[in-house]
Amino acid sequence: MPVELPDLPFLPSSLQPHLSAEAVNRRQTIHRAYVEQVNASIAGTDLEHAGLEEILRQAQGKLFEAAAQAWNLGFQWQCLTSPRAGVEPGDALGQLITRHFGDSNRLREEFNRIAQSTDAPGWAWLVQHPDGTLGVVRSLHAATPLTGPGNPLLACDLWEHAYQTDYQQDRTRYLDGFWKLVNWTFVASLLR
C-alpha cells in the first residue's frame, strides 16, 4: 500500500493571518511531491507495504530525504491549529516547560534562538529526551529527531518556502506568527 498524503487537520485558510491559505497550499503541494517521490522509490521493493515511519528508519540517500520531509511536514501540520489568543501549554506539559525553561516565554526565546542560529534550511524542534527532560534542537535539511533518541513534540519548518509567501525573508516575523498557531493539545498528547 503506498504512503498517502495525510489530510490537513484544518482548512488552509484557518491559519490566517499568520499563515495564508496560499502559503499552506504551497507547502501542501511540496508535501505531496515528497509523498509521490517516496512512493515512486519504494515501488517493487521490500518497503512497498511499509508505513512512512518504517521507511524513514530504514531509508538512505534520496529516499531518506523524501521520507523525512514527508514525515516532518505531516507532523508539523498536526502541531498547528487556528490562532487562539493567550493559549498556553497547561498541565504536565506546562510543568515540564517551567521546570526545563523557566516558563513558556523562555521556551519561545530558546526555540527562536535555535531557529535563527543558521541560515541553512531545516527544522526547529521541541523534543523530549529519553530521561524525560525537554530540549530544543535544530535539524538541517531533511534530518529529523524521529530517527534519534529524542521524542519529537513540536516542529517548525525553517525552509524558505515555509515563510517566503507571507514573510519574504523575515524569519523573525514568521516565528512570531508560528507561536500563535501552536496546537498545545497535540504537543501535550505526545509526552511520554
Image: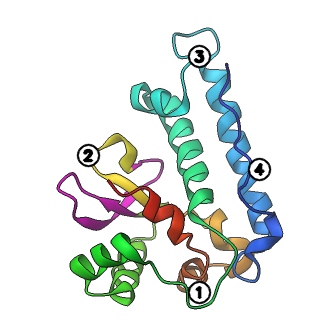
Q: Are circles 3 and 4 on residues that touch, CB within 8 Å?
A: no
Callout 1 amino acid: Arg
According to the image, label 2 marks what residue?
149
- Residue positioned 67% across, 36% down in the render: 35
| Dot in front, 2 or 4 | 2
Disc 2 secondary structure class: loop
- Residue positioned 55% across, 52% down in the render: 75
**Of the pair 169 and 33, the residue shown nearer to us:** 33
According to the image, label 4 marks what residue?
29
According to the image, label 1 marks what residue?
173
Callout 3 amino acid: His
Asked if residue 168 is positioned above or below residue 59 in the image, the reply reads: below
According to the image, label 3 marks what residue?
49
- Residue positioned 29% across, 44% down in the render: 148
Is 159 colored magenta in this rendering?
no
Rounded to the nearest angstrom, the CA distance separating label 2 from label 3 is 25 Å
Asked if residue 80 is positioned above or below residue 38 in the image, the reply reads: below
Give x and y (percent) for residue 40. Answer: 67, 22
Sequence order check, earlier mark of 2 and 4: 4
Sequence order check, earlier mark of 1 and 4: 4
- Residue positioned 34% across, 52% down in the render: 151
Magenta range: 126-144
Task: Give the tally of numbered discs.
Answer: 4
